[in-house]
């Protein structure tokens, strides 16, 4: 009985770990590596295991850094079941198809460039057919329902409060006469965040595999965050500029819209045009609408009262490229929510290209920015950036609004761990080294936990 770490050990993206019980191997997540070009090129590397040797996959949630290499796993020979929460199954289809579309478009452009230089053509990371082949293997489950994954491994999903369908995974392992309870946190949300329920309490455990994204960080309070966003909108109005919000299509975009709707009158949003400029975010918002039983009490009441979440009379859903291009004619009065959330691709790049050199423009960063990403460079104060081969001066005002993060901060993580009633040993993943070290110290001091920081290739004997 063994746990081995692969991706998101010593870094944030690329979540991937193996649990072995008896003669079976089960993968926990199979995520894309995200960040700079060098990091993303690692997605083309072979897996450090034989895909056909994996009996099943258990998926914590839909985000690509947890699900995005599933098509490569299937293309490599895996053909077993993939278990996920019901809403996660629906969202993964949207995400994988979008990732495939981007890969195919980018490869087509690259091959035109390579042809002009007499270079050999390259293949996309994966295609729509690859994405659909992987998605068809996913079996959706509700929260808190037992699922026999393989002999000796029983799985159950519990709400992690991160995005719709996100789960902390509880594994009941049995080998011979020995039993172990392994808990994988997945990504944990903030307590008290809107729309979704708080992360669930799990009870006791024998060992915990836990994310550490925001170790050493404490988010601004919800009240201060709302006040900050209101000030940004007011300043942009007085300065006659636009507001750009790079946002992940799943989770963050819906929360931003929810926040704008709740504060529509207080922020005088009737003076603005709000654009959700992301086909994927539009599709994901429809899926969010289909799962009202997963909302928290406040969101449930809002839906029952006005039958939408919540109303934005001036919201424009721009699905087509032509509709998106029209936005770039606006020099003021536009709030644009667009992907990608780390500014590494997608429509946000076009909006940045048309606005980032304007001092009247406000750019609001509302999510985690991986090392090497364009969003990270903006947060760190880059004075010039390159988009589509053009160097641009950064004159816009950059705001980092941490209070909207879908990830719990250090206190949220310690609270979740503290609700594991027996203080089990914990292995930290999904965090940069500094964050993991900070959370190790926090859990050791506050919870008297035995904390280890996972490294790629590290193995843990679960019977020791």
Image: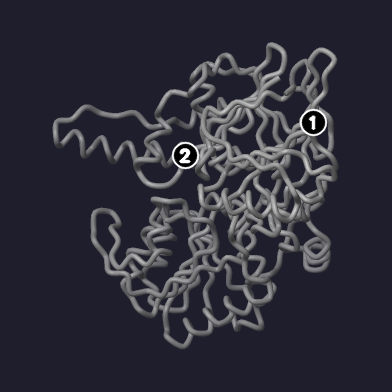
Q: Are marks 2 and 1 in contact (CB under 8 Å)?
A: no
Q: Residue at x 85, y 43 (%)?
A: 203
Q: Is residue 300 left or right of residue 329?
A: right
Mark found first going from the N terminus, 2 or 1: 2
The residue sitting at 71% across, 67% down in the picture is: 310
Q: Toward the viewer: 111 or 324? A: 111
Determine whether 47 is above or below 373 in the image. Answer: above
Camera-nearest residue between 315 and 68: 68
Residue visible at 37% across and 64% down in the picture: 352
Secondary structure beneath dot 2 equals loop
**Mark 2 to mark 1: distance in Å?**
28 Å
Residue picked out by circle 1: 181
Q: Is 391 left, or right, of 116 in this rendering?
A: right
Q: Quadrant of residue 78?
A: top right
Q: Position of residue 162 (x, y in %)?
A: 68, 51
In the rendered image of this protein, does residue 27 appear above or below residue 385?
A: above
Give neighbour class at mark 2: few <14, some 14-19, many 20+ (Cα, 10 Å): many
What residue is shown with label 2?
Answer: 33
Name the residue furthest bottom. 238
Quarter holding residue 405: bottom right
Callout 1 secondary element: strand
- Which is closer to the viewer, label 2 or label 1? 1
- Which mark is drawn over residue 139? none
Work out whether residue 393 can be spotted.
yes
Please name whichever residue, 359 or 7, is drawn nearer the observer in this view of the structure: 7
Quick check: 140 left or right of 114?
right
The percent coordinates of residue 386 (x first, y second) are 28, 58
Task: Report whether residue 85 is seen.
Answer: no
């Amino acid at each position: 009985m063994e746990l081995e770490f692969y991706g998101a050990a010593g870094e944030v993206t690329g979540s991937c770990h193996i649990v072995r019980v008896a003669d079976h191997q089960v993968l926990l997540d199979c995520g894309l590596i995200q960040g700079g070009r060098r990091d993303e090129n690692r997605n083309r590397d072979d897996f450090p295991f034989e895909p056909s040797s994996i009996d099943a996959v258990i998926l914590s949630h839909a985000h690509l850094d947890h699900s995005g290499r599933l098509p490569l796993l299937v293309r490599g020979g895996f053909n077993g079941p993939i278990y996920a929460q019901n809403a996660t199954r629906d969202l993964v289809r949207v995400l994988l198809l979008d990732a495939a579309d981007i890969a195919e478009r980018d490869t087509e452009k690259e091959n035109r460039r390579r042809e002009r230089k007499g270079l050999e053509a390259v293949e996309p990371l994966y295609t729509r057919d690859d994405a659909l082949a992987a998605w068809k293997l996913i079996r959706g489950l509700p929260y808190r329902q037992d699922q026999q994954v393989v002999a000796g491994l029983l799985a159950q999903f519990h709400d992690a409060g991160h995005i719709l369908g996100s789960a902390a995974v509880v594994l009941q392992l049995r080998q011979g006469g020995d039993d172990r309870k392994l808990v994988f946190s997945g990504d944990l949300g903030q307590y008290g965040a809107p729309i979704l329920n708080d992360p669930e309490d799990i009870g006791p455990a024998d060992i915990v595999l836990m994310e550490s994204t925001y170790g050493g960080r404490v988010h601004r309070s919800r009240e201060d965050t709302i006040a900050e966003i209101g000030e940004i909108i007011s300043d942009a109005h007085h300065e006659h500029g636009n507001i750009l919000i790079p946002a992940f299509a799943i989770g963050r975009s819906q929360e931003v819209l929810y926040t704008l709707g709740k504060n529509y009158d207080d922020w005088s949003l009737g003076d603005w045009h709000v654009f959700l400029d992301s086909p994927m975010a539009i599709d994901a918002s429809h899926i969010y609408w289909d799962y009202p039983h997963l909302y928290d009490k406040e969101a449930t009441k809002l839906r029952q009262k006005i039958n939408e979440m919540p109303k934005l009379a001036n919201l424009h859903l721009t699905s087509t490229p032509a509709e998106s291009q029209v936005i770039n004619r606006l020099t003021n009065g536009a709030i644009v929510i667009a992907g990608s959330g780390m500014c590494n691709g997608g429509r946000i790049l076009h909006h940045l290209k048309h606005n980032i050199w304007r001092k009247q423009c406000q750019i609001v960063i509302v999510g985690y920015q991986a090392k090497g990403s364009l969003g990270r460079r903006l947060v760190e104060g880059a004075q010039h950036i390159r988009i589509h081969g053009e160097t641009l001066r950064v004159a816009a005002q950059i705001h980092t609004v941490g209070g909207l993060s879908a990830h719990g901060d250090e206190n949220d993580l310690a609270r979740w761990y503290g609700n594991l009633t027996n203080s089990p040993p914990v292995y930290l993943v999904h965090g940069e080294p500094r964050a993991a070290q900070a959370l190790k110290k926090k859990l050791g001091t506050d919870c008297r936990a035995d904390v280890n920081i996972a490294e790629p290739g590290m193995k843990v004997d679960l019977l020791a």
